[in-house]
Image (spheres, rainbow, N blue to C red):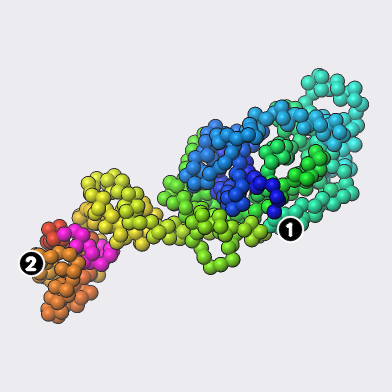
């Protein structure tokens, strides 16, 4: 571990909704920073102006607010290393581009897109590198006067990083160990484009990470191929002593089949891949998020933490604070992590069970009210206490519990056929008489009296209770019958019983 104060960053591009894989990357950065009493920086990579999507930056910030992932520094948070949007750092990058050019570590390239395409067509697997650059139109093959003239004439150019062959580049990765890449297979990456006077990802990231004193770069596996280039850039600038440690996280894979998780998988299988609902301003398409699907943020955090990382124990349920304590970046898997959306549902169910009945009632009460029922929070809490263990999401409660608040207006045909016997009307009339004579209509007041009556009459308890349930609920669902009748009270229970007798006789 570095002796410097731990500083990590999450640096999304404002090009659309935040994918759940990006959320996991941010979460791992957050856990790592908190574990080491470090700092988490929020940076915006908006150097590709063509892909900018209005509203995307605020969407990303809203997502982290909902999830409870807090940043210490960066866009909207302030800090001493700003500005934190790359589009506002043009002059900074220009200075470092010029340094590389002056030291002969980079060069101007004037090849047009058409010329590059012709090369690729003529040479399979063409790469702009040490073996091909002297065949191209760049400052290595032109005189200084010609280069100056082209720039003065407004000729568009790019600046490429000069990578010479014949050496091995080592990347020390906290997850994958030492990765060695031969420089011969690396191409001379574009670092800067005159067309928009902005650097590419490669240069901007290195400069920002250095100036913002980033000590650890924790990012997705897809960036692993660029790591050797970043190592070489740190060396080129003379910053090798402050090079961050790398950790490349495993990909999130499709729930089934091969390949990485995509929005199409979520659309096909019916699960979200974005934290919040996203309204695409370009297409008008609306994609539901984990929040709108009814997930608790702490359930999403817990689920994502275990996608590609394992604590080495059987424990699965962790608070965010517990995750900070036990998280170990070196225990992340090298292999991709399959996105098990059924497990996400399981986590949400577990967090429903963890919430108090009072908390759940606060969430369920608006749904009850929206269905036209004026009910006290105390009674909503009683229903939640009976039923919350049967749902995975708060919004599932109404379909399961509506009978507590609204009497049945019809009776499920299959249940009637199976549970309403020839003598059910007669038996229910007798039960109504038994119940009407009770002064104590609590569970304790009803149950022994009714059970004694059933025994004395020689009735089958299952037949009586099934018919009783059908009368009060309208179908064969719900908790214990005396829980239901005690909640409804004597007057409502008798009203429902007598209506069922009239309807089903």
Earlier in the chain: of badge 2 and badge 1, it is 1
Q: Which residue is mark 2?
A: 437
What is the secondary structure assignment of the residue under circle 2? loop
Left or right of 99? Residue 77 is left
Position of the N terminus by quadrant: bottom right
- 277 shown above or below 472: above
Q: Position of residue 142 (x, y in %)?
A: 90, 28
- 92 shown above or below 447: above
Disc 2 versus disc 1: distance between alpha carbons? Answer: 78 Å
Q: Report if residue 97 is visible in the image.
A: yes
Q: Report if residue 222 is visible in the image.
A: no
Q: Which residue is mark 1?
A: 177
Left or right of 177? Residue 43 is left
| Residue 439, label in figure | none
Q: How many marks overall?
A: 2
What is the secondary structure assignment of the residue under circle 1? strand
Q: Which numbered mark, 2 or 1, is in the foreground of this view?
A: 1
Q: Position of residue 487 (x, y in %)?
A: 21, 59
What span is colored magenta in the figure? 474-489
Query: For the point 21% across and 70% down, which residue is it?
Result: 465
Left or right of 412? Residue 207 is right
């Amino acid at each position: 571990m570095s002796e410097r104060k731990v500083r990590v960053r999450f640096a999304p591009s404002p090009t659309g909704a935040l994918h759940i894989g990006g959320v996991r990357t941010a979460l791992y950065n957050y856990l790592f920073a908190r574990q080491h009493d470090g700092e988490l920086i929020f940076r915006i990579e908006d150097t590709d102006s063509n892909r900018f999507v209005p509203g995307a930056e605020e969407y990303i910030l809203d997502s982290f607010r909902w999830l409870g992932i807090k940043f210490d520094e960066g866009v909207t948070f302030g800090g001493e290393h700003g500005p934190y949007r790359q589009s506002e750092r043009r002059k900074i990058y220009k200075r470092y581009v010029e340094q590389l050019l002056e030291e002969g570590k980079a060069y101007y390239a004037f090849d047009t897109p058409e010329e590059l395409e012709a090369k690729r067509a003529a040479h399979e697997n063409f790469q702009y590198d040490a073996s091909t650059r002297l065949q191209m139109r760049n400052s290595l093959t032109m005189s200084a006067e010609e280069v100056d003239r082209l720039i003065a004439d407004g000729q568009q150019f790019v600046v490429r990083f000069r990578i010479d062959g014949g050496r091995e580049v080592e990347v020390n990765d906290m997850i994958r160990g030492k990765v060695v890449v031969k420089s011969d297979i690396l191409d001379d990456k574009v670092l800067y484009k005159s067309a928009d006077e902005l650097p590419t990802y490669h240069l901007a990231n290195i400069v920002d990470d250095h100036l913002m004193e980033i000590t650890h770069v924790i990012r997705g596996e897809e960036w692993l191929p660029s790591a050797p280039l970043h190592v070489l850039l740190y060396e080129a600038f003379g910053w090798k002593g402050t090079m961050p440690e790398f950790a490349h996280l495993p990909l999130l894979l499709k729930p089934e089949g091969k390949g990485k998780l995509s929005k199409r998988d979520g659309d096909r299988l019916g699960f979200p891949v974005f934290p919040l609902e996203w309204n695409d301003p370009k297409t008008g398409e609306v994609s539901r998020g984990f929040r709108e699907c009814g997930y608790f943020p702490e359930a999403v955090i817990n689920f994502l933490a275990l996608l590609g990382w394992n604590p080495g124990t059987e424990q699965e349920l962790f608070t965010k604070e517990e995750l900070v304590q036990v998280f170990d970046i070196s225990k992340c898997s090298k292999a991709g992590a399959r996105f098990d959306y059924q497990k996400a549902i399981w986590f949400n169910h577990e967090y429903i069970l963890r919430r108090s009945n009072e908390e759940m009632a606060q969430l369920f009460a608006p749904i009850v009210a929206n269905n036209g029922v004026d009910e006290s929070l105390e009674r909503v809490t009683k229903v939640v206490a009976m039923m919350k263990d049967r749902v995975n999401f708060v919004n599932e409660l109404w379909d399961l519990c509506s009978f507590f608040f609204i009497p049945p207006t019809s009776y499920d045909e299959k249940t009637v056929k199976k549970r309403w016997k020839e003598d059910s009307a007669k038996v229910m009339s007798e039960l109504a008489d038994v119940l009407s004579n009770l002064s104590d209509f609590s569970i304790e007041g009803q149950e022994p009296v009714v059970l004694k009556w059933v025994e004395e009459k020689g009735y089958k308890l299952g037949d009586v209770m099934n018919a009783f349930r059908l009368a009060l609920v309208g179908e064969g669902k719900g908790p214990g019958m005396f829980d239901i009748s005690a909640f409804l009270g004597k007057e409502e229970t008798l009203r429902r019983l007598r209506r069922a007798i009239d309807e089903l006789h």
